[in-house]
Amino acid sequence: ALHAAGLLDAWLHPDPGTATTALAGDDLDGYLLPLPPHQRSTGATLADVLAPEEQNDVPAARITEVLTSVALADVTTPDASPVTIGVDGRYAQGIAAGRFAKTSCEYIGATARATRRAARVTECERLLAVIDTDLDAVDRDHASVEALLAAVDTTAAQLPAPAPVHTALRELDRAAATLRARQEASAAAAARLDQALAERAAAAAALRRSAAERSLPVDRLDDTAEAVSRFEKGGVRLEGARTAAARAAEQEDQARQRHDEAVDRLTAAAETARTARARHQEKAEAYRTLRDSVGADAERVLTDVARTADAIIEAEQAAEQARTSLGAARERRVAALTRVELGEQALVAAVTEAQHDAQRLRPYAQPDLLGLLRCPTDLRWPAQTPDDALHPQVAALHEAILAATRELSPTETSLKQSATRLTTALTDLQAQLPAAGLDHRPEWDTDDGVIVVRVADEQGLTPVAHFADRIGRERRDQEQLLTDSEQRVLEDALLGQLARQIHHRTIEARDLVTAMDSQMRARRMSSGLTVGVGWRLADDLDAEQRDVCKLLERDPARLGPAQLTTMRRHFAARIKTARAAAPERPYRELLGDVLDYRQWRTFAFTLHRPGGDTEALTRARHSQLSGGEQSVSLHLPLFAAANALFGSARPDAPRLLGLDEAFAGVDDTGRGELMALAKQFDLDLFMTGYDLWATHPAVSGAAHYDLSHSAVEHAVSTVLLVWDGSTNIADFDGTLARALGSPETRRAPDGRGESDRTGVLLDLADE
């Protein structure tokens, strides 16, 4: 019962005051305290059957007080004490009750404890004897193993180095692959040679047949060639002469037609001249007859006629001038009428445009827009506007807008920049408001040529200016409600949660880097060197940043008020500096940059020698390594990082890693080491390259696709070669591809004579 109730091995503090203080403080322990005298049982207690042992740690009187606080009675009786022990194994301790039994008593009294210690000492001595026997056996096995290892080392030292054998095997594989490729190329070249010889024989036969059909005596070859040359030149001249003759014939026909027309006009003119001469002679004869008969009267009449003719000529000239003046006046009148009509049309268009522009001012009559434009907010749009005159309220609105924008001089560039800023602001507003989680949705329309933005919330659609004012007032109210102490508590809670997240992520990243370092250190190069990686604080951090990083490495639950104050002051100063440097950036992005713990640390690589020497792997030290060591030191962190990340995946997940232009500039020895390294990490590699063959002993299986592009046929041909760990098997008839489960399908050309696929070389480090 004492064992089940937890009283058998409980502590008794020698000082009651100290025990009470320890229980009231932060001490993580428990003690037995005696009950007050008025709460103790009046019947039998443990003090009646148990006696305190004489010792110097706890006074016997205090032990007696604790024993008298535990009643020795039947637990099932109604008036049992709250702390009761029964002789049958039952116990009651407050609200806990139960029963427990043992085969024999333990730990009660000096004799029982001495017996227990003797039994334990005997058991420990027996175990020590067994352990000594096992250690002797292990020492003997260790000595035999060391002797065997020494013999193996001696034998291995006497054996020749395996590097020449491996080199010879690689050379043999390379020579076999080269031989097969050259044999295939030789067979293809022989087939092409036979085809070319057959074509050459056919062409020679056709040439001989044509020569026999068109043969000439030798002495006539020069004459024939000269005649052919003269014929060609004559043909060229004849072609030019024919063109000139045709052109001359056309000109001759045109000249003949003009000549016939001129002859006809000449005949008509001669006939007219004869008629005119005859009429002139008749008139002259009549004139002479009239002058002879009339005399002086005729002279006077002729003088009057001449004067009348001159007057008629002057009158005709005056009439011509009057007609000219009349035409000019009519033209001026028509031009004036046209200008008047155009002026009236321009006036009507100007009035219409002015009324249209005045109608465009209607959206600006809203009080919120007038406030943004720094115009009087009491301006309103009239209820009705006449068609022929501008309303005074519209004119006042126009004058107010002109006065507010008179100093502005927008250009095309500034308008584009304003449109870009407006679009960016609308995009940010649309992205930020829903992200706040308060069900605020921005809406805008451009029906009147003005973008009016409203925000939909629990109060309906509200203009964005009013919404901003209301949010500002609510924020100020919240700031007034949030006291300084509450703000500190809130910031401490946020900082504690933030520190917890950064702490966990830092620990995870450090564990990941530690795993990478152990994996990299376990892979040695051919020279025995190993490369390690570490994650240390950056060199550009100041003392305050280093202190904060050290605080974040500690458990957040153990951070006190002083540490939280230091963190709050540091992050507040960093956020204030960041906002001053980029006030236009969103607050979320600023927090992301300030709290980006990845920028506080940097990766550092180390080079470890077989003897235990360690040095930093800098650029200068890396350049001193051999070509293969440089390649391995560059690819080893990549493989280790991939292996560390793949460690969190399912066991059957593919461990695929893609490398474009893999191992470019690396010799065969370096490629072999990198292939062996990928095999050690159990990675599946998908690689492309110009000259890349995974035919290395460390690779258990690989599939190569050798691509050949034909610019003439606009096609790409592929040949599958499978490496089984020892030989390269070529698949020319598709048997191997079908055996591996390939669908043997390709995408057809797009109809323009060009293939829509490019070549890929696939290397896998495992089947």
Image: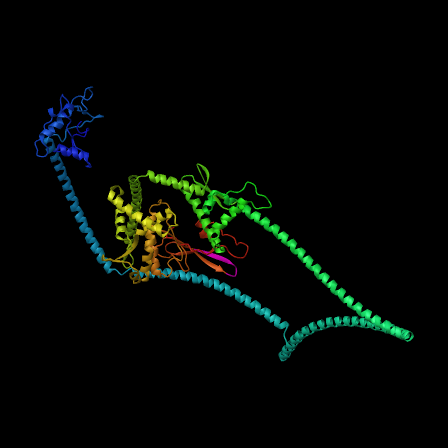
Is 596 on the left or on the right of 107, as rendered?
Answer: right
The chosen color scheme is rainbow
Is 664 on the left or on the right of 111, as rendered?
Answer: right
Please say whether residue 512 is one of the residues in the magenta stretch.
no
Closer to us: 164 or 753: 753
Q: Main secondary structure of the magenta part?
A: strand
Name which residue lies at 34% across and 50% down.
578
Is 9 on the left or on the right of 278, as rendered?
Answer: left
Residue that extends furthest to the right in the rendered view of this protein: 293
Up/down of 431 relative to 321, above or below: above
Which quadrant, please, contains the N terminus? top left
Residue that extends furthest to the top in the rendered view of this protein: 78
Q: Position of residue 741 (x, y in %)?
A: 44, 49
Name which residue lies at 67% across and 58% down.
335
Q: Position of residue 55 (x, y in %)?
A: 8, 33
Q: Position of residue 646 (x, y in %)?
A: 35, 48
Q: Quadrant of residue 62?
A: top left
Name which residue lies at 72% across and 61% down.
327
Closer to us: 230 or 561: 561
Is 400 on the left or on the right of 699, as rendered?
Answer: right
Please say whether residue 719 is one of the residues in the magenta stretch.
yes
Closer to us: 545 or 94: 545
Viewer can see residue 287: no
Up/down of 381 relative to 417, above or below: above
Up/down of 701 relative to 307, above or below: above
Q: Position of residue 199 (x, y in %)?
A: 55, 66
Query: Which residues fall within the magenta stretch?
Result: 711-720
